[in-house]
Image (cartoon, rainbow, N blue to C red):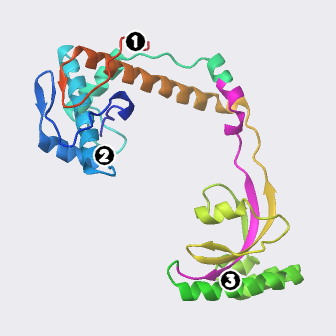
Amino acid sequence: MTTPLASPCAVKPAITAKPRTVSVNGIAISRAAIGRETQNHPAAKPIEAWQAAARALAVRELLLQEARRLALQPDPAEDEEGRRETDEEALIRQLVAQEIVTPEADEAACRRYFDANRQRFQSPAIIEARHILLPAGPKDEVARAEARRHAALLILQIQQEPTCFADLAAAVSACPSGKTGGHLGQIGPGQTVPEFETALGHLPVGTVGEAAVETRYGLHVVWVERRIPGQQLPFEVVRQRIGAWLGEKVRRLAIQQYITILAGRAEITGVEIASSPSPLVQ
């Protein structure tokens, strides 16, 4: 189990061309440790990964020192998969739990957020569609060119005789749905590959699409039969979700402020952690 380190927002890197010695209250963080930590901080440039790793380890050391100053004793926990915390991970978790107390979002706060963001709380739109799949690998340009040509002919034929879609699907589609006239049933978000889902949202309803949809699987001749808009969810259904989100937002801010306060009292070299007189969110 890995305890999350501080958000990068809590610290500001010292931009240098050469890594500097990093220490917290005289305790040095080895370059070897920073080097190992860089794998958790992908960046465009090696120096940026190094700086991010150094910041994360400096914040970790800062929190561990505070936990030990408060004489906390590690009580490692296990996650649902049986992975056990290290003593250091346990100390950081216990420190945060003891020192950072934030209020739960009340009914009024949740209601205000809901009223200001109603568009976020809707049931997903549902699309009923059928298709004809002409298979072609994503890198097989010859096959894809032939599939495009074939798809164009099918679209033209369906435009002239819409009732033939099911027969054509049964005859040429490489998808098992061809046996049922190409019917895909009701499709919701995340149920198809992204490129197909995006195209479904823009195709006309009640007719065949004028152009085939290209996906990693090949070319699709698509007929959208019905588009059912998402419905507004009542506040009571999303109240708990909103409360959890608002609570986590406040908690993250409180952790950042707590780290800032600790950093303002500490002697830190090699990285800069912004100090602030602002009191910790309670």
Q: Which residue is mark 3?
A: 173
CA gap, disc 3 to disc 2?
Answer: 45 Å
Local secondary structure at mark 1: loop
Residue ID at (36%, 34%): 8
Local secondary structure at mark 3: loop
Q: Which stretch did the figure color magenta?
A: 113-137
Q: Which mark is residue 278?
A: 1
CA gap, disc 1 to disc 3?
Answer: 65 Å
Residue type beneath disc 2: His
The residue nearer to you, when weighing 141 against 175, is 141
Q: Was residue 136 drawn as part of the magenta stretch in this picture?
A: yes
Mark 3 or 2: the one toward you: 2
- In the rendered image, the quadrant that contains the N terminus is top left
Q: Which mark is residue 41?
A: 2
Earlier along the polypeptide chain: callout 3 or callout 2? 2
Q: Was residue 75 drawn as part of the magenta stretch in this picture?
A: no
Residue 34 placed where, x, y %?
A: 18, 41
| Extreme-front residue of the structure | 17
Q: How many marks?
A: 3
Residue ID at (81%, 61%): 226
Left or right: where 245 falls relative to 269 = right
Residue type beneath disc 1: Ser
Q: Is residue 33 above or below residue 25?
A: below
The residue nearer to you, when weighing 68 against 143, is 143
Residue 109 placed where, x, y %?
A: 62, 19
Q: Is residue 203 above or below residue 220?
A: above
Residue ID at (73%, 51%): 125
